[in-house]
Amino acid sequence: MNTRKALYQFGYRRCPDQDRPSPAHHPVVVVGAGPVGLCTAIDLAQRGVPVALLDDADRIGEGSRGICYAKRTLEILDRLGVAQACLAKGVTWKVGKVFQRHDLLYAFDLLPEDGHKMPAFINLQQYYLEHALVERAAELPNLELRWRNKVSGLTRRNDGVTLSIETPEGPYDLDADWVVAADGARSGLRGILGLAFQGEVFEDRFLIADVKMQGDFPTERWFWFDPPFHEGRSALLHKQPDDVWRIDLQLGPDADAKAEQSPERVLPRLRQMLGHDDFSLEWVSVYTFQCRRLERFVHGRVVFAGDSAHQVSPFGARGANSGIQDAENLAWKLALVLKGEAPERLIDTYDLERSAAADENIGHSTRSTDFIAPRSAQELRFRNAALALARHTPFAKRMVNSGRLSMPSTYESPLSTPDQDVWAGSARLGAPLPDAPMRDRHGRQVWLLEALGDRETVLHVPNGAPPPPGPRTLVVGEDLIDENGLFAQRFDSRPGSTYLVRPDQHLAARWRHPHASAIESASRRLHGREEGHA
Amino acid sequence: MTALLTESRFPDPDRAYRALIEAHRGLSDEESAALNSHLVLILANHIGDQAVLQEAIALAKQSMAQPEAVSG
């Protein structure tokens, strides 16, 4: 059961670089064709940067990997051209329920308002996401995906990196201005550079099972503390496409990983949980987990992204989601630096912004794990007290933690221009813009985030004065019509309100009444050109 | 119950919970019980209101009275 089936097989192909007398030069080489490497490569290619993407394997396999993709990730995937495929296949959900014993303790709704293009979450087997990304990558002429290209060595130079690569037909070398190491939790590049990967190791063991069955459970995330079918532990049930259900059972620190994976042990457990045995097993494994990170994500011209840079527990779906957000943060910055439109130190803000995001994710994931898997009798007493009090008081309900699900980070960043004015609404400086339904000049429906795309943009609400100059200005009321007022509400906009949006759709600056010079200066700051930053 | 506040008051309850967990890390069970006793006295004095204290005691006993969660 635990031999990974290859679901999609790709061929190794010899590339011209292997026949050159001296190493070919590439602006960017991305190592690792998982979701993070693929997103980085596609984003760069869409921004006009040629990319070579290397992977040591030649297939996408099954396995118990990421299944939950959050709204912000879907917005990024939409910009990269794969969200529709993912939505069509995925299971859309937004409600989570937390049970203790037989009883519902509380339910939460992750997206209680309408007027967003993307749902709160979809569940989708990681191989479907990877497959959609590989297909998208194949459409981009300046993106070259090389299977069975394994990086075996790395030499750092001041202005780049030389990679030694092994293939079925022997080794070759490549020169790159920048290398993105998206090669996963067991990153080979991290090993080659000898970088420490430190943090907290959790002792509790968990059983993960993907079960195929016709179930009439709703498409919600159900989490049990101390369920009647698995006493004293926790359990999770979540729907995936193809009638597959993800089940996660806490086993405790002393569980025998090998024995627990055997069908004789697994099947009765699942039978007890599901109340029948009309199911088949797609996947079973026992895992422990760690929360750890690299101290720095940028090492000269080698930049780490995703699991190679930081690892979290699975509670909260913060692994793949944060990795894809790393990819998006890095891609526009690398593209600007490579085109000479920003100084190299802009890349330092990737380290700064995404390190803070990693700390946030690790913090949430650690605190969830503390609650789900208490380590001592006292921790268990606190946990059980919170659960018991949750039936009586709102405060304890808020402490019950079955995983805080992935939300995008708000960057406290030198790239942001601090607010001078007072703002309400849900838009926040440093955060991704809230989406809103709009119409374009021709009356066609368009989502705000679609209209923004991947370019730095000034959004301006007219007040009679000429719209501010800039490489790209969208005037609300002309270029974009705020038909039902959701933009005004979410951005607290009035005549004159003006917003500078980053190429990753985060808010960089806003003014009630801007001067052209203020916008110019905020844009310089966004490009890492303002003095005294970072 | 009127004097005792039971709505959520920490801006980030997860951090408050974690602070308690961390305070107990590395302690024996007996030391943990002692730490909790010290904490209760300190916090009770901080509240400084006999009626609130009585309500809190009553709520704690009430929530303990329900079928006990299985430990393990």
Image (spheres, coloured by chain):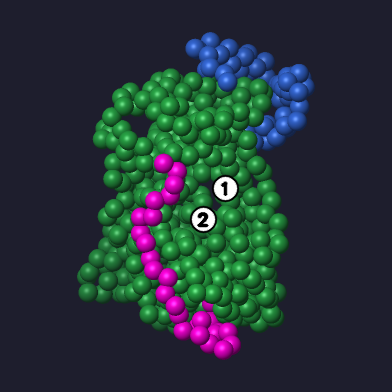
Amino acid type, label 1: Val
Q: Position of residue A177 (x, y in %)?
A: 59, 80
Residue found 29% across the figure and 53% down from its top: A89
Q: Are marks 1 and 2 in contact (CB under 8 Å)?
A: yes
Colour of the chain lettered B: blue
Q: Is residue A222 visible?
A: yes
From the top left corner, tell me how far across and down residue A494 is, in percent: 41, 65
Q: Residue furthest bottom?
A: A21
In the displayed structure, does residue B10 sit left or right of residue A332?
right
Disc ID at residue A322: 2
Find residue A452 and report its horizontal and vertical position in percent.
39, 70
Secondary structure under tag 2 reads helix
What residue sits right under mark 1 in the picture?
A: A312
Q: Can you say whether B70 is above or below A125 in the image?
A: above
Q: Amino acid at mark 2?
A: Ser
* Tags 1 and 2 on a common chain: yes
| Cα gap from disc 1 to disc 2, whole angstroms | 10 Å
Residue A265 colored in magenta in the image: no
* Number of residue marks: 2
Residue A433 visible in the displayed image: no
The tint of chain A in the picture is green
What's the magenta region? A1-30
- Considering every residue shown, the one lying at the far top of the view is B65
User: In the rendered view of the protein, which quadrant contains the N terminus of chain A?
Assistant: top left
Kindly identify which chain the residue marked by label 2 belongs to: A
Classify residue B43 as left or right of residue A374: right
